[in-house]
């Protein structure tokens, strides 16, 4: 069985390569994404932020991160 050294993903349409077994929480920390000010979608489904530590990123996952902007 071939061991995967890198995982290919897309974040907001851009291609990235990350380490295997990385969770969404790891990704948020790595890219210094402010958790409270974003919504995260994994493969077209909105992710509950309480589950970020449990969700492992897989090869070819598509992640969308939307930042909230205040205004008036």
Image: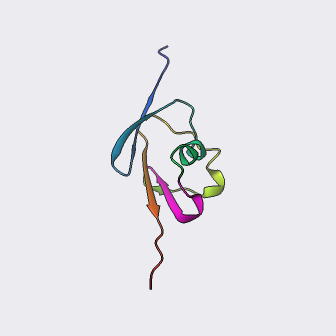
Question: Which quarter of the figure is the C terminus placed in?
Answer: bottom left
Instruction: Look at the picture and state if 25 lies above or below 1.
Output: below
The extreme front residue here reads 32
The extreme bottom residue here reads 72
Residue 40 pos. (x, y %) = 50, 56
Q: How many marks?
A: 0
Residue 13 pos. (x, y %) = 33, 49
Instruction: Look at the picture and state if 35 lies above or below 58.
Output: below
Residue 18 pos. (x, y %) = 47, 33
Residue 31 pos. (x, y %) = 50, 46
Give, as a single range, the part of the protein colored magenta: 33-43
The extreme top residue here reads 1
Q: Residue drawn at (48%, 22%), measured in percent from left and top? A: 5
Asked whether residue 40 is drawn in magenta, I would say: yes
Instruction: Look at the picture and state if 56 lies above or below 20.
Output: below
Which colour style is shown? rainbow
Q: Residue drawn at (45%, 27%), measured in percent from left and top? A: 6
Asked whether residue 53 is drawn in magenta, I would say: no
């Amino acid at each position: 069985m071939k061991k995967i050294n890198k995982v290919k993903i897309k974040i907001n349409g851009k291609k990235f390569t990350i380490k295997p077994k990385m969770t969404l929480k790891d990704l948020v920390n790595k890219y210094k994404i402010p958790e409270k000010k974003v919504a995260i979608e994994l493969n077209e489904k909105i992710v509950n932020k309480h589950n970020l530590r449990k969700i492992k990123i897989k090869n070819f996952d598509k992640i969308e991160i939307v930042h909230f902007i205040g205004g008036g």
